[in-house]
Image: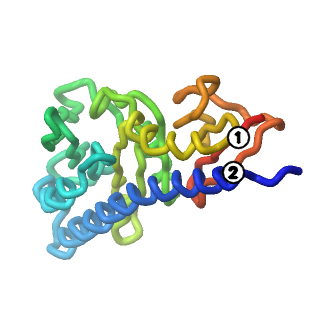
Amino acid sequence: MPAEPPAVGAAAAHVRATLDGVFAAVDRVRDATARCLADAGRAGRAPVRADLAALRPLLLARLGPLICGLGFIAAPQLLADAAWYMEWWQTGPGGRPSQLLRDLDPERSALYDYTRWEWFTGPESGAERTVCGPYVDYLCSDEYVLTLSVPVHVAGAFAGVAAADVFARTFENEIVPALREIPAPAFVVNAPGRVMASNTASWPPGAAYRANPAHSAHRCGDLSLSLVTAG
């Protein structure tokens, strides 16, 4: 069997390092959110939206070239003054940060049930790290994105998720140069088999992939992603 080109291992490591950097920011949000919610509990009351405003300096500081959206999405009924809530900030026009303001009151609107999305159900079901996408994010940006999320727990109970959005095009721009160093068709796929970035038009981002015995799959560290090479 021919030896694996060094560029394959390098590309897989680059994918992991890129997303590890995003998860580092998400982990900071998780920890800060847990502290905010725990402080409310120690004060003998249920948390409210105003408690989560303390997260804003952290969120704004970590929006940038790679992370286009960042925040906390509350489990239903977590907050005393909002049955559903997102403390979410994203890059707006001209690169200025803006808060996502959605009407999530089921008494006044057709509720957008965010608890059905993989980036919420993964952490809720026990996954430590979830990578969702690429998909069109109709809730936040109406853009093609990846969402990385982790669970937030307080006193052992699931309280919601901390998450970050990365534009799919930004992820591709970061990853494709490493893929082009591989002397064969190569692409990154997520656990459901959706192509996230590629060096070949045969497997464009968003395409569905099913395992092929003629291809080789290489895990990207402990992430639920694989680098697939063909030929």
* Label 1: element kind: strand
**In the shown orientation, is residue 48 left or right of residue 165?**
left
Say which quarter of the image contains residue 215. Answer: top right
Query: Residue at position x 47%, y 34% from top?
Result: 134
Instruction: Identify the residue at the far right of this view.
Output: 1
Q: Earlier in the sequence, mark 1 or mark 2?
A: 2
Q: Which mark, by number, is residue 153?
A: none
Specify whether residue 228 is in view.
yes
Residue picked out by circle 2? 218
Residue picked out by circle 1? 229
Q: In this view, does 197 lie above or below 162?
A: above
Tag 2: residue type?
Answer: His
Q: Position of residue 115 (x, y in %)?
A: 39, 41
In three-dimensional space, the C-alpha distance between marks 1 and 2, rounded to whole angstroms, equals 8 Å
Query: Residue at position x 18%, y 46% from top?
Result: 82
Q: Where is residue 140 in the image (x, y as percent from the top left)?
A: 28, 34
Mark 2 Cα-neighbour bin, 10 Å: few <14, some 14–19, many ≥20: some
The quadrant of the picture occupied by the C terminus is: top right
**In the shown orientation, is residue 30 left or right of residue 2?**
left
Query: Residue at position x 45%, y 53% from top?
Result: 19
Tag 1: residue type?
Answer: Thr
Image colouring:
rainbow
Specify whether residue 77 is in view.
no
